[in-house]
Image (tube, grey):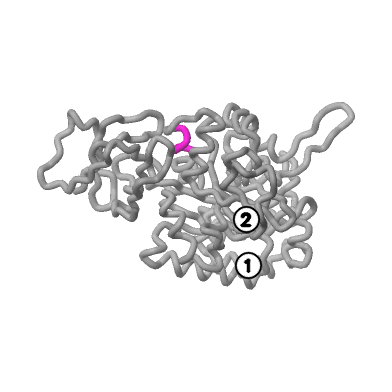
Amino acid sequence: MLAITNANLIMLDHMVMDAVLFVEDGKIAGYGELWKTDIPKDCEIFDAGGLYVGPGFVDIHCHASNGIRFQFDPAGSVPNTLRHGTTTLLPTLAYQYSKEVLLDGIRLVREYSKTPEGESVGGIYMEGPYLNAGFGSDKTAMSTLCWNKGVFKEDYQELIDELGDFVRVWAVAPEREGILDFVKDAKKGNPDVRFAVAHSEATPAQIEALMPYGLCIGTHHTNATGTIVKYPECRGVCVDECVNFNSGIYAELICDKVGVHVDPYMLRLIRKIKGDERIILITDASSHPGPKPPGYEGSDDLYFDMEGEIGGTKLTSDQACRNMMKHTGAGFPEAFRMASYNPATAVGFTDRGEIAVGKRADLVLIDDRVNVQGVFLGGRQVK
């Protein structure tokens, strides 16, 4: 048995200061305040040195790390997420690729997940392929792909068959004609799969129609999430309002350092509406080659395209937590809930995401600025 001593434990809704945490057979075997807990003489001791110990991060939406996309080189990208405390990762494949490229990426990630180095890979998050190509950059990205021509079984079934139960989330635009057939077939491929509304201009009614089938996530809430129809008499609604209104839908948030993806005021508003129990911090990390334009000197977690426009993030989960705390005043328990417990629960991982007896001993050790100092994966120290 391993005893992690001199630790400040980050629980779901409180802290246990000056604590000891016991790990046995890769799981959490117990914990308590150090001064009143007996440590068996045969325990291996790991002195946390007063660091904070929380559940490992669960990043369900991330395309790349270290500037490398998972679908092309998981061995070159996944380890960097683990070093930053992400003990469960869903590599995310996106809509802008052909079926052949997606199939190759799925196979590569799955094979890597079977290796000791790929233990943190918990499945795949499919951001698409059936999204809305009618607005923003999506129109150009998807214009030549079969996914933009219609929702046809002969196109998508091979993806469903290849993924099997390895897919945890399918992101869809509920307004796409024929999307319900896809959703039903996707559930046949994996009855436990979840769905997310993404890159969509759906009405609340169209979104809510898919909730009985497992739609429970709003992909990168308030980013590429439709346009508000303006009526003469009133302000209309779009995807954002539906996600805010429905307590059964988790809101993914991209929380960068300077508040480009979601304005800090909006972050605070969403937190007030959704509550800490229905927010998921994601990195949505990508890779783009462009230089940093003037005015962003203070940002180190953004990518830019060659025209100087925002091209995604280079976030890691520890940075996302730190930014959320900065922008909203969330404390350690709240931020870790958003980055660990909520995402794990949303996609069906019931064995991780919190410090509790019987849960996986996926742990991250941080200082008071959320700088990662140590990582345990299944009770094994990997950093």
Near-viewer residue (244 or 282): 282
Q: Which residue is mark 2?
A: 127
* Residue to which mark 1 is pinned: 157
Residue shown at 52%/58% (left/top)? 66
Instruction: Give residue 178's position: percent from left, percent from top.
Output: 73, 57
Q: Can residue 357 be seen in this snapshot?
A: yes
Q: Residue at x 50, y 33 (%)?
A: 325
Farthest left residue in view:
41
Please say if 152 is above or below 203: below
Q: Could you say where residue 236 lies in the image, as x and y percent from the top left?
A: 79, 33
Q: Tags 2 and 1 in contact by the CB under 8 Å rule?
A: no
Q: List x then y, in percent, for residue 159.
A: 60, 67
- Residue type at mark 1 is Gln
- Tell me the SS state at disc 1: helix
Could you say which disc has been placed on residue 142 in the image?
A: none
Q: Which residues are magenta?
A: 334-338
Instruction: Write down the quadrant of residue 253 in the picture.
Output: top right
In the image: residue 139, left or right of residue 284: right
Which residue occupies 15% across, 46% down?
A: 43
